[in-house]
Image: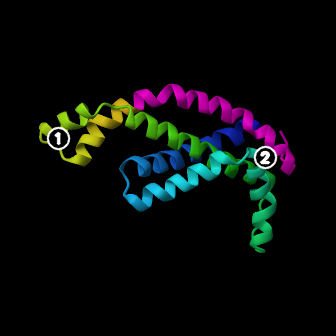
Amino acid sequence: MTLWISVLGLAGGLIIGLVAGFARCFGGWIANHIALVFIEIIRGTPIVVQVMFIYFALPMAFSDLRIDPFSAAVVTIMINSGAYIAEITRGAVLSIHKGFREAGLALGLSRRETIRHVILPLALRRMLPPLGNQWIISIRIPRCSSSSASPN
């Protein structure tokens, strides 16, 4: 059960993290600040509080919503790992020297093509070690879901 919770949570967290990380790097002012608020709130709260909020508080706020413990654990890992992966993504993109961007633009590539063909391949290589660490951490997280009666 722990493996399924981790795999499903990390798959969703990777999508959330990439979107939020790219919003922080390449988005406009509004997208940047929305992603920043999401990341700071999630990274600033303990995982047990997040599990409790999703499992107990959301069904109380929305009377038609019923969440089983498995889904609560998966959604919690998605949101939590998404916030951390967003910072991994942002850090990897910002670690690429501005000379690479300037070189892509000097070669006649558009901003989008420069990001796609120059910046992202380099950033992906820098993202892999911290992503591996995040995946290992996220495999340990489902133990916290036992507070919502999810079988582990």
Quarter placement of the C terminus: top right
Q: Would residue 52 appear left or right of 93 to someone viewing this image? A: right
Q: Name the amino acid, label 1.
A: Leu
Q: Name the amino acid, label 2.
A: Val
Residue displayed at 43% across by 27% down: 126
| Residue 39 visible, this angle | yes
As displayed, is residue 68 above or below residue 5?
Answer: below
Instruction: Find the residue positioned furthest to the top.
Output: 129
Residue of label 2: 48
What label does residue 105 carry, if any?
Answer: 1
Residue displayed at 80% across by 45% down: 145
Q: Would residue 118 appear left or right of 37 to someone viewing this image? A: left
Estimate the x, y position of residue 8 in percent, counting from the top left.
64, 44
- Element at label 1: helix
Residue displayed at 80% across by 38% down: 143
In this rendered view, identify the residue nearer to me: 108 or 87: 87
- Give me the C-alpha separation between circle 2 and circle 1: 46 Å
In this rendered view, identify the residue nearer to me: 125 or 31: 31
Which segment is the magenta one? 124-152
Estimate the x, y position of residue 24 in percent, counting from the top left.
43, 49
| Residue 66 visible, this angle | no
